[in-house]
Image (cartoon, coloured by chain):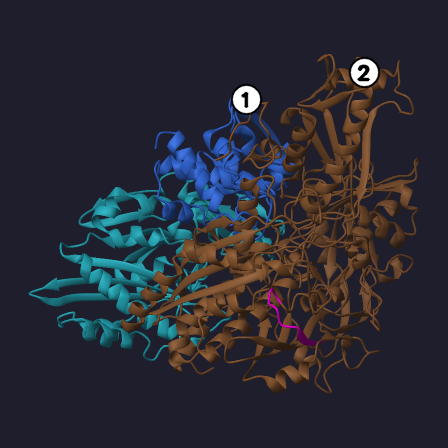
Chain colours: A blue, B brown, C cyan
């Protein structure tokens, strides 16, 4: 049996019939066609699938689409506004905080949440805050630099 | 922080932010799982739960009864295709037939047994549970040393000794060196199996167009062209009917420098069902079925004088190959032997390699590929010799370095090191770290009973693979540079970057040579239908070899630009710089865009010149390059728990000339993090039955942000004469340098307890036990 | 990666939910941080799921009659950052900050975590040290259990079929109480290899109250009663802490895995008990 869900994604409303087991990440990627959030594991460790649901960063691989019914979702595709990058995106670019880019959409959204809650984090707080996002390319140093730079830019 | 460049400035050498990044930071890049096609079907693969078993029967009826399941293929259906190719050759190498699906036996946990094709990925996964396989489990062996014991289970029944090959290399007079030595130190050193763990797993989309009789395979690969050749052969398809595309690739680290069963299988399935097919590897499959790295047991002996002179080195290297040879599996340990002497002057070496089959997934190239094992070995042995004779580990290195005036330096293993200034790199690292002050701090710490260590690794690596005679599939690279009629520049490279940033670094080269803006350059790669044949990205080669091909293509193009410029300016004396051709007599100029337009309009061709502004160059490097450097690591071990704290990490690397320092730093950071993973956290563990115990990211620890220290980077710059850009390559340096520096540091910390050596990973319990036992293993 | 299919029900009231769960054949879904990964790996395959996420009124942290009541659907993040808990029961808030990662804490709930009863979960150590109570409800009834009677074994609790965690009740700390949660996190999973929650109070210069909750060490989390008794009435000197810590592992069958053998795990528990007690005493 399928369920009717309506969600707002990046400001646009969507309505679909979904199987209850359909994971939010597959709903976003395969049904809606937003392939920015990625899948890097099946154990809720890597964070590549991170999106915001009602303003909270969540791992979209560990949520059923039916659980998101009626909620506001932000994916990496919706982060830039009016063609202007979010300061976190801009900082990731400036600081070379990405290489293969696969973890990047999730990493940026996690960093964004971190800065919303702690506008002027220490290096240790940044590293702790990003524990739920694995990167195999950068060694994290440029990511930490980017989060610091974004914090400075945002006046934290 | 990247700088913004105005058009009059040069680009090479600057910290330019990457051209790749806008699509990656907005989530609009296209990785293989992002590809959607009308009518696309999904494949899931049933894999063996046993490390060794006979397949007695496979029943697929229940799966096939489901309306969403389109087909199920098993070993008997694919007898006409394959095998999975091995590209390496060694004298006497035993090559087991590697079918794309198991036939009557399985050889490792994860061995593909059947492929389900369904209308959606959820049904494909469900259908795996509806296939029944009767197995007769057989004894398995997962440990390479146990596999060599008499009576061990035979991985392949036809070779009961489990030996795939032996390989011997010797130089100098080893027996004499050891006879004359004051000191001989022996140590068994394990470089444990690692799981590469690119964050994007592998994936394949295959699309067969029956009208055109052409197959397109999208694969998350580092080597699209080699894959095209090899998959075409495996499928019996003319190579010109196959197009391979490496879309955005989410990390490789060698694990995607391969041709796997799945690429061949998906090509087969697409042709069978006449629909596009997608297969995406799960993380568990990635851990079970994508190649692992390392897997060495090394028995080292080093001979030296009491004054610190190293006389010789012996090595017996047992390589865990796994159950099959993947593309380069047997070649990897031979790279270890090549780099065994490190950057030291001794001339006497003897290496014996035994390649051993085990009931595990094959090992193959993982970041560093044979060189981290060699560097770990020599750097540990040098430290052990220093400890034995009571010499400072920096001093013994200074004493034995190949000297700057000895280059090109012919190594006893047959290589020719291009350039090096090893002492300068170590001096710089010691200066950055404050080495002598650290030793004072250590004295004080030890008086307080603290376990405080300082570790050095001075590494050399063989990079920029490489001259073709020394590589399995050609070691050159191709580049095409095309100025379009509007003056925009397109670069086609045979390199296949997947995070390294060559869309930017190659554009920087173009900007300086052609005087165009960086936004006017597009670098294309990874599509065999678009790019001339190339070799790909691995072995720290893309910039040094691929970049050099771009450079030479640009030189030829500039000659052509000048010819057209001369024609347009009606001059016989022109020069070209800053994007304009100038008549040296009149000072009149014509822009590159005007020249480009004229070259395609072709109303007035210079004598003997073709229309258009295109230049293609296939560059064959005359040698490898040999980057080097020195890393210093300060650690403290918690006496109560055995936990290691990295207090300082100093990395001084010399990768020759640098096009973009920002990207070089990124490569070093990432490389060090992976080396740190090996040193402290990572180990692929199989139990005695060949079950992978570390089968998920819940069990196998790759470093998180909290587990990596801030890395203090610096550089020395010793250009190579091997290419005109002076570039050596940097992709693997951090990984190669890191693990011995960390282990040397921790051994140094524990040395007051009498500890001489510890095998990786340095997990807390291991260190705690050593501390408990007063250093006795 | 892909779970088996199931029937999904999302009741809007607790009564409705309890009725749907009453026959014990459905699995309640809270934050899903434990259940969904198990389903994806097909280690769990419930045929029917009752999502508690649409029921209002299960998410709160409030003080009543000298106790703090926490609704079962309250997230780890809300507990971690609750000003009330930070001020009046800081041990639970600081423990919540150690769970999983930011995204997991955003979604995972205290009720779900307790019901899952992972022997390496963080909350149980703190709740045991706090002598918390857990209020359970089922169709037509409810009961309140001391937390130590709630955990039965690995992934096994005192919950009856059809019963769910409704609320967790923790004390408002008396002045002079110091607490600490010390954890060795598994480098891959982030779960507790061992986790020690320490809670101490001084009175007349002596240790008047000592509570130690231990997680990760054994098949279920437990209170280290013998250690507590050994510490109470002492001066809380370093030797007293060590003597108490030694009792933490007495008679305990320690877990063993690839990362930590039983012997090492027990050792870690003793070391972290000392560290936890030391840090709690400093805060007291």
Residue C210 in the image: above or below residue C247: above
At x 56%, y 45%, the residue is B664
Circle 1 residue: A83
Say if residue C281 shows up in the picture.
yes
How far across and how far down the image is residue B772, in percent?
38, 80
> Residues in magenta?
B342-353
Q: Quadrant of residue B661?
A: top right
How far across and how far down the image is residue A16, in percent?
62, 32
Q: Is residue B760 left or right of residue B625?
A: left
In reply to whether residue B462 is colored magenta, the answer given is no
In reply to whether residue B345 is colored magenta, the answer given is yes
How far across and how far down the image is residue B248, in percent?
68, 40
Image quadrant containing the C terminus of chain A: top left
At x 46%, y 76%, the residue is B387
Say if residue B361 shows up in the picture.
no
The subunit carrying tag 2 is B
Q: Is residue C75 left or right of residue B462?
A: left
At mark 1, the secondary structure is loop
Q: Which mark is residue B523?
A: none
């Amino acid at each position: 049996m399928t369920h009717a869900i309506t969600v707002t994604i990046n400001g646009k409303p969507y309505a679909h019939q979904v199987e209850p087991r359909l994971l939010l990440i597959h709903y976003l990627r395969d049904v809606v066609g937003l392939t920015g959030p990625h899948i890097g594991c099946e154990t809720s460790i890597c964070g590549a699938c991170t999106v915001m649901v009602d303003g909270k960063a969540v791992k979209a691989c560990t949520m059923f689409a039916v659980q998101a019914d009626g909620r506001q979702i932000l994916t990496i595709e919706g982060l830039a506004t009016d063609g202007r990058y979010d300061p976190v995106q801009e900082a990731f670019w400036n600081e070379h905080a990405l290489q293969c880019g696969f973890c990047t959409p999730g990493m940026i959204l996690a960093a964004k949440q971190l800065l919303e809650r702690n506008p002027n984090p220490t290096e240790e707080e940044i590293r702790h805050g990003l524990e739920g996002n694995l990167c195999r390319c950068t060694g994290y140093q440029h990511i930490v630099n980017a989060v610091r730079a974004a914090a400075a830019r945002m006046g934290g | 922080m990247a700088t913004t460049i105005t058009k009059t400035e040069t680009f090479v050498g600057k910290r330019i932010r990457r051209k790749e990044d806008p699509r990656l930071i907005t989530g609009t890049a296209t990785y293989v799982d992002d590809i959607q096609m009308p009518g696309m079907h999904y494949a899931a693969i049933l894999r063996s739960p046993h490390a060794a078993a006979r397949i007695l029967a496979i029943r697929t009826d229940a799966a096939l009864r489901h309306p969403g399941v389109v087909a199920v293929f098993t070993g008997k259906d694919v007898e006409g295709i394959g095998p999975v190719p091995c590209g390496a050759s060694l004298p006497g190498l035993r090559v087991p037939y590697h079918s794309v699906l198991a036939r009557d036996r399985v050889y490792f946990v994860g061995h593909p047994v059947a492929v389900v094709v369904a209308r959606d990925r959820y049904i494909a996964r469900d259908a795996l549970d509806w296939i029944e396989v009767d197995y007769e489990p057989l004894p398995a062996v997962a440990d390479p040393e146990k596999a060599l014991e008499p009576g061990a289970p035979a991985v392949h029944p036809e070779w009961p000794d489990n030996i795939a090959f032996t390989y011997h290399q010797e130089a100098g007079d080893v027996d004499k060196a050891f006879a004359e030595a004051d000191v001989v130190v022996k140590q068994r050193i394990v470089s444990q199996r690692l799981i590469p763990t690119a964050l994007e797993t592998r994936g394949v989309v295959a699309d067969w167009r029956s009208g055109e009789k052409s197959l397109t395979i999208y694969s998350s690969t580092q080597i699209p062209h080699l894959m095209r050749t090899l998959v075409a052969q495996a499928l019996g398809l003319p190579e010109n009917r196959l197009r391979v595309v490496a879309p955005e690739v989410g990390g490789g680290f060698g694990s995607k420098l391969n041709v796997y069963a799945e690429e061949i299988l998906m090509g087969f399935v697409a042709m069978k069902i006449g629909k596009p097919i997608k297969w995406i590897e799960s993380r568990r499959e990635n851990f079970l079925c994508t190649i692992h790295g390392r897997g060495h047991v090394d028995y080292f002996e080093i001979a030296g004088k009491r004054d610190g002179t190293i006389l010789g080195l012996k090595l017996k290297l047992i390589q865990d190959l796994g159950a099959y040879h993947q593309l380069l599996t047997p070649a990897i340990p031979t790279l270890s032997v090549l780099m065994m002497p490190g950057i030291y002057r001794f001339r006497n070496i003897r290496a014996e390699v035994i390649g051993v089959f085990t009931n595990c997934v094959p090992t193959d190239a993982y970041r560093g590929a044979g060189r981290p094992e060699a560097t770990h070995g020599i750097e540990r042995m040098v430290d052990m010799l220093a400890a034995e004779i009571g010499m400072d580990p920096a001093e013994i290195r200074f004493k034995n370095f190949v000297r700057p005036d000895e280059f090109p330096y012919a190594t006893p293993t047959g290589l020719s090191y291009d350039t090096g200034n090893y002492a300068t790199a170590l001096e710089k690292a010691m200066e950055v770290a404050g080495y002598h002050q650290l030793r004072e701090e250590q004295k004080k710490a030890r008086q307080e009973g603290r376990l405080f260590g300082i570790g050095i690794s001075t590494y050399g690596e063989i990079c920029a693979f490489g001259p073709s005679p020394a590589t399995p599939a050609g070691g050159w690279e191709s580049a095409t540079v095309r100025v379009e009629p509007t003056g925009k520049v397109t670069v086609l490279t045979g390199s296949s970057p997947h995070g390294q940033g060559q869309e930017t670094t190659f554009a920087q080269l173009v900007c300086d040579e052609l005087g165009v803006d960086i936004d006017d350059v597009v670098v294309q790669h990874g599509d065999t239908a678009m790019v001339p044949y190339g070799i790909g990205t691995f072995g720290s080669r893309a910039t040094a070899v691929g970049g050099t091909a771009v450079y030479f293509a640009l030189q030829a193009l500039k000659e052509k630009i000048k010819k057209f410029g001369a024609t347009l300016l009606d001059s016989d004396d022109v020069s070209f710089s800053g994007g304009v051709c100038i008549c040296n007599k009149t000072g009149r100029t014509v822009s590159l865009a005007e020249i480009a337009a004229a070259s395609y309009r072709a109303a007035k061709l210079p004598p003997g010149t073709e229309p258009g502004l295109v230049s293609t160059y296939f560059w064959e490097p005359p040698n490898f390059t040999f980057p080097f450097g020195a890393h210093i690591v300060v650690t403290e071990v918690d006496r109560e728990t055995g936990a290691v704290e990295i207090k300082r990490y100093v990395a001084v690397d010399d990768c020759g000339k640098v096009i973009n320092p920002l990207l070089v730093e990124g490569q070093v950071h990432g490389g060090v993090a992976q080396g740190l993973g090996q040193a402290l956290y990572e180990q692929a563990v199989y139990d005695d039955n060949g079950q992978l115990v570390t089968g998920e990211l819940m069990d196998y620890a790759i470093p998180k942000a909290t587990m990596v220290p801030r890395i203090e980077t610096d550089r020395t710059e010793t250009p190579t004469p091997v290419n005109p850009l002076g570039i050596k390559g940097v992709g693997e340096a951090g990984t190669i340098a890191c693990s011995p520096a960390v282990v040397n540091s921790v051994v140094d910390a524990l040395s007051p307890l009498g500890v001489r050596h510890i095998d990786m990973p340095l997990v807390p319990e291991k260190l705690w036990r050593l501390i408990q036992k007063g250093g006795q293993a | 990666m892909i779970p088996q299919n199931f029937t999904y029900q999302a009741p809007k009231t607790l009564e409705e939910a309890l009725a749907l769960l009453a026959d014990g054949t459905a699995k309640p879904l809270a934050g899903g941080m434990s259940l969904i990964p198990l389903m994806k790996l097909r280690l769990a395959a419930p045929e029917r799921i009752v999502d508690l996420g649409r029921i209002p009124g299960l998410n709160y942290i409030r003080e009543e009659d000298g106790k703090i009541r926490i609704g079962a659907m309250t997230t780890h993040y809300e507990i971690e950052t609750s000003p009330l808990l930070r001020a009046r029961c800081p041990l639970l808030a600081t423990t919540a900050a150690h769970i999983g990662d930011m995204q997991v804490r955003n979604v995972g709930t205290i009720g779900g975590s307790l019901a899952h009863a992972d022997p390496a979960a963080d909350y149980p150590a703190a709740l045991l040290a706090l002598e918390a109570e857990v209020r359970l409800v089922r169709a037509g009834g409810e009961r309140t259990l001391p937390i130590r009677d709630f955990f039965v074994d690995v992934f096994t609790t005192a919950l009856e079929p059809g019963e769910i965690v409704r609320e967790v009740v923790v004390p408002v700390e008396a002045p002079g109480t110091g607490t600490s949660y010390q954890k060795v996190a598994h480098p891959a999973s982030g779960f507790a290899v061992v986790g020690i929650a320490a809670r101490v109070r001084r009175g007349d210069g002596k240790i008047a109250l000592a509570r130690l909750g231990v997680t990760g060490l054994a098949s279920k989390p437990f209170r280290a009663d013998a250690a507590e008794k050994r510490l109470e009435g002492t001066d809380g000197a370093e030797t007293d802490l060590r003597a108490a810590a030694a009792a933490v592992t007495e008679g305990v069958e320690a877990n063993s895995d690839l990362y930590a053998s039983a012997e090492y795990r027990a050792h870690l528990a003793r070391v972290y008990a000392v560290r936890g007690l030391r840090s709690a005493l400093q805060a007291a």
